[in-house]
Amino acid sequence: MSAVTKEDAALEELFMQLKKEFVSKKKVDPKTVRARFLAHVKQGQKSKFTYKRVGVFVLVPVLSILVVAAAVVAAAYKNELIEFVQGQKCVVENNLIVSELTRPVFNCELCRNMDRIERIANISRQEFLEKYAYTTVPVVITGATDSWKALDTFNYKYFKKLYTSMTGGMKEMSEACQFFNWGYPFETLEEVFNMTDARAKLEPGEDSWYIGWSNCHTETARELRKNYERPYFLPEESESSRLDWIFMGWPGPGAFLHIDGVSRPSWQAQISGRKKWTYVPVPECAGICKDKYEAIVEKGDIIIFDSNQWYHATFVMPGEISITIGSEYD
Ligand SMILES: O=C(O)CCC(=O)C(=O)O
Ligand SMILES: [Fe+2]
């Protein structure tokens, strides 16, 4: 996985600049904002790809052969492929350009009157369905994991033992499951579990770290699921993705601002520590919605969000190691 590229950083800066500009002008047409942003994005993309045109004469025939071969393989491994595609949650391997061009247009009316992210305890299934399940409005449901074993069992040592003791667990994980280092110096989960005990515990003088992985290894996933449940407020008929995501790390920056290419909303449960989420509405909502929304998710809370509709970033607050488990639902 690569860290943020120069293009991403430039685009993020442009994104923020345009937002500021349009917020100060107020009554500007959201479509104009989006059009201008996309124009910049496309311009950047054109200059990036023009010099590669020569390669097209070689690439086209080669690609055609590859496409035919891929079609044959796809037909043979259809089910495995569906599972793989469903697992591609985050866009870190892509970049902001691709995600900005491919994301759906956001309905800014949804955040026009939203001035904060609500924190709600004991929500009923009905209320959750009406207000949050599919509206893309982020919400924190407090004390939602009270009966989960994970609150006592999940920690760095537990994961290390689980993944290093399973036959083929670590190897399979490294080859097949997604891993995010968010710019920290680990390339695989194996490297994470090979760090010194001092760094793992963030003893004085050690550098902080934050990583995430998709739990696509069936055997370990089965073991992990003994420790948590499907959130009680999700609509009865909704199905959770078979893939779960774990994010773990010490205080400091977590995920950098990004938007994901997934089609379903997500839940994420805070098992240990506290994490601040920042949600930034897409550029066309500048002047209609607030510039950004923040929520601190405490141990035992579950946050609901649509990672395909909001730019989002995380920051682990001072204190314990942050450990979260989450999934998508439909
Ligand atoms: O938990 C995090 O730090 C980031 C998670 C994220 O980006 C996501 O679930 O879409
Ligand atoms: Fe994300």
Image (tube, grey):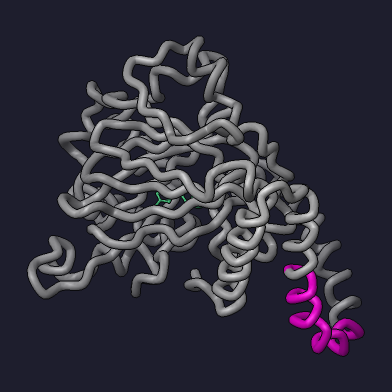
Q: Residue at x 89, y 76 (%)?
A: 60
Name the residue located 48 percent from the left edge and 40 percent from the top edge. Answer: 243
Whether 42 is among the magenta residues is yes
Q: Is residue 290 magenta?
A: no
Q: Residue at 39% of width from left, 24% of height from top?
A: 231
Range of magenta residues: 41-58
Name the chief secondary structure element in magenta: helix
Q: Position of residue 315 (x, y in %)?
A: 34, 55
Q: Is residue 80 visible?
A: no
Q: Is residue 118 left or right of residue 134?
A: left
Question: Relative to 293, does residue 38 appear above or below in the rendering?
Answer: below
x%, y% of residue 104? 72, 45
**In the image, residue 259 above or below residue 105:** below
Answer with the quarter of the image where residue 143 lies: top left
Q: Is residue 301 above or below residue 172?
A: above
Quarter in which the C terminus is drawn? top right
Quick one: which residue is furthest to the left in this view?
204
